[in-house]
Image (cartoon, rainbow, N blue to C red):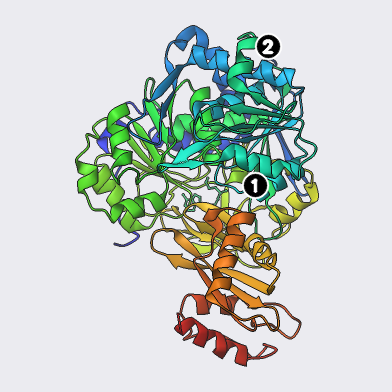
Amino acid sequence: MTDETRIAVPATAKAGTHCDLAGYEALYAQSMENPDGFWRDQIGRLDWVKTPTVMGNWSYDPVDIKWFEDGVLNASTQCLDRHLATRGDQTAIIWEADSPDAPSRTLTYRELHGEVCRMANVLKGMGVTKGDRVTIYMPMIPEAATAMLACARVGAVHSVVFGGFSPDAISGRIQDADCRFVITADAGARGGRPVPLKVNVDKALESCPGVTGVLVVRHDGKPVAMADGRDVWWHEARETVPAHCAPEPMGAEDPLFILYTSGSTGKPKGVLHTTGGYMLWANLTFHYVFDYREGEIHWCTADVGWVTGHSYIVYGPLSQGATTLMFEGIPNYPDVSRFWQVIEKHKVNIFYTAPTALRALMREGEAPVKKHDRSSLRLLGSVGEPINPEAWLWYWRTVGDEKLPIIDTWWQTETGGVLISSLPGAIDMKPGSATKPFFGVCPELVDAEGQFIEGPASGNLVLTRSWPGQMRTVYGDHERFVQTYFSTYKGMYFTGDGARRDEDGYWWITGRVDDVINVSGHRLGTAEIESALVAHPDVAEAAVVAVPHDIKGQGIYAYVTPNMGVEATEDMVKELKFCVREHISPIATPDFIHLTPALPKTRSGKIMRRILRKIAENDTSNLGDISTLADPSVVQALIEGRKNR
Ligand code: WT7
């Protein structure tokens, strides 16, 4: 399998496409040469209360990013009100439960509009006003989307916290965003097991005295504790309010949501997206990248707790009047054909998932896929991490029968929506390449000094121009925004990813070049995991690195130094894993914990991660220069420790 393998746009993708190759080239050229004209042509995709007259108004040095700044709109209107006349009775959301035996649910646009208005009214009654931050901690049920849109309707800023996060992680995010309100559910279900959401919220709120109201959706139905004067049942409150609620007019640059994501240093950052630019980007990319056709059923398997769920379960599809499928379960419950069974059951047309799921399912062979009718499928998508050519080809052959286009979409929480991807009807595919930049996106490669690298080459991926969906700041810490993204290379946005551009100008994303680990498409910072480990009273020091992992893409390898006099035992390893689960989430649990009396450090005390990575990968043939180490014998001891596992 060479990089040169090129798969032409399939005939099925050409028929009825919104954009062929000539169209892509013309629009891309316009977006580069005349960005103002390009965006003026696109703003009509949204319903504005006041149409903006200014398009992009941004600078990367000093950092100040604005798009459509004099425009006024409401995000929920784009997703609901404007569809009522034309598609009020069309299904907006299909919900599929964790268990195939439970009935599925559907909501039409009219029903969803009513639910959102009611929840908006309930939120107002609880005291939520424009600009308030509201934490949403929900299972994958339609009420999660209702909650996001209800916040948008009243002008509140939602902060969705993934339902797999621990009470500690929830309270940290509530405190950082200074939230006074939480929307949650009694419990969720995943793979046949309950997820105790309300219990987790109650624990989290022990350290969040500022929270005055909790709206609780009944889903699981089992009893939960309800705090008097603070907790409100949604099913009761919704009966007391009207199904109409005027949308709050929002400035294009008013915040729409905060979403916490891990970086290479410190605690997770509150990535802030604003209303106009984000909505246009979600809508435009959904239209072109998924090449969405009227009446189609779109299924993005992500959780709404991640940006993928925000943009391609909720805001992109609903703003386009699509039917979006929400699935509460997991790919291998009750068995490994669950995805394909759901596709058959709901006649899914667009399927968007993560490489880690494909790699896990690939191991199970063809039979679980082939036994289901997949003839409804038109498009396959991948997101979250680099897709290896083997997994790509399995997707292409086994799932798509060599007929369906595959879009490998590269983007980030920070970018709001897709930045590099093929357009299905326009761009030939190469297995493992995200292919070409979307309209308005200008990727470049730079070397360590920030010099541009031309032609086919590898380097660090930067973006030299702003696009409307770009994050605007880190909530409450603009300096951190500037430092994190614009200080490595002045005047450019640094993605944190490495990439290669080939002879055809195709982009191949090679993965993070900073201290961020991508475990099954979940982004984790080494610093965050280290701080969870050192929270254990017997730990002196910890250093975490990534190791290649067959299914997860990357695994977590943690070196931990116990305090003097503490014995390194298997029990301690267990306790440390537990500690990470409690502080962050089970997804952050280290695959390996290597207890060691010392870590390799320079004489100035800096931990040499390069060496730790090599040892973790069992690649000790070329450790490079270790003469700068304060105590070179530490390395030999670590290699011995690695051999013994
Ligand atoms: C990081 C962003 C995009 C939404 C979900 C993840 C990696 C993402 C791809 C892809 C190679 C990818 C990058 C990026 N990544 N998509 N198609 N090919 N790498 O969002 O949690 O903010 O993570 O995920 O390393 O920087 P996120």
Neighbourhood count class around disc 1 (C-alpha, 10 Å): few under 14, some 14–19, many 20 upward: many
Side of 275 where 521 appears, left or right: left
Foreground mark, 1 or 2? 1
Q: CA distance from mark 1 to mark 2?
A: 34 Å
Q: Position of residue 70 (x, y in %)?
A: 75, 24
Q: Position of residue 180 (x, y in %)?
A: 76, 33
Q: Residue at x 61, y 28 (%)?
A: 216
Is the residue 446 above or below the residue 277 in the image? Answer: below
Q: Which residue is mark 2?
A: 246
Q: Position of residue 403 (x, y in %)?
A: 24, 40
| Amino acid residing under circle 2 | Ala
Q: Residue at x 53, y 23 (%)?
A: 319
Q: How many marks?
A: 2
Q: Which residue is mark 1?
A: 167
| Amino acid residing under circle 1 | Pro
Q: Position of residue 340 (x, y in %)?
A: 29, 39
Element type at mark 1: helix
Determine the image quadrant of residue 604.
bottom right
Side of 568 where 5 appears, left or right: left
Neighbourhood count class around disc 2 (C-alpha, 10 Å): few under 14, some 14–19, many 20 upward: few
Q: Which of the two discs, 1 and 2, labels the residue nearer the N terminus?
A: 1
Regarding residue 32, the answer to whether it shows in the image is no
